Image (spheres, helix red, strand yellow):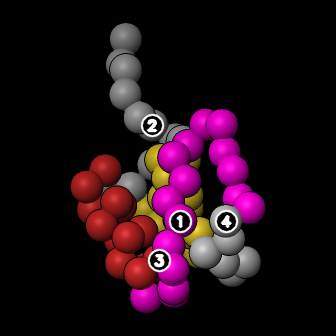
Amino acid sequence: MDFGIKESIIAIITLNKNVTSSTAPVFYVNNEDEQEKTALLIAKITLGMVHDLRNGVYVVVRH
């Protein structure tokens, strides 16, 4: 049996303070530059992929 993070949302990085999640950590950032850097660092650390939802939200997922 294989346990670990697979095929799930690892993190949500957003400019919008109203975004909440009960399943993934939410990182609130102050600007788009900080958002992109934070998403890329989290993806690098977790071996995830960054997806821009084009609504002020990035998600880092494992495929």
User: Residue at the location (51% across, 46% down)?
Assistant: 25
Spatial CA distance of label 4 from label 2 is 27 Å
Residue at image mark 4: 17
- Earlier residue among tags 4 and 1: 4
- Earlier residue among tags 3 and 1: 1
Q: Quadrant of residue 45?
A: bottom left
Q: Secondary structure at mark 3?
A: helix
Marking on residue 28:
1
Highlighted range, magenta? 18-33
Tell me the mark number nearer the camera, choosing from 4 and 2.
4
Q: Residues within 10 Å of mark 1 (few under 14, many from 20)?
A: some
Spatial CA distance of label 3 from label 1 is 8 Å
Amino acid carrying label 4: it is Lys
Residue 60 part of the magenta segment: no
Residue at image mark 3: 35
Residue at image mark 2: 6
Spatial CA distance of label 3 from label 4 is 13 Å
Tell me the mark number nearer the camera, choosing from 3 and 1.
1
User: Residue at the location (53% across, 65% down)?
Assistant: 28
- Earlier residue among tags 2 and 3: 2
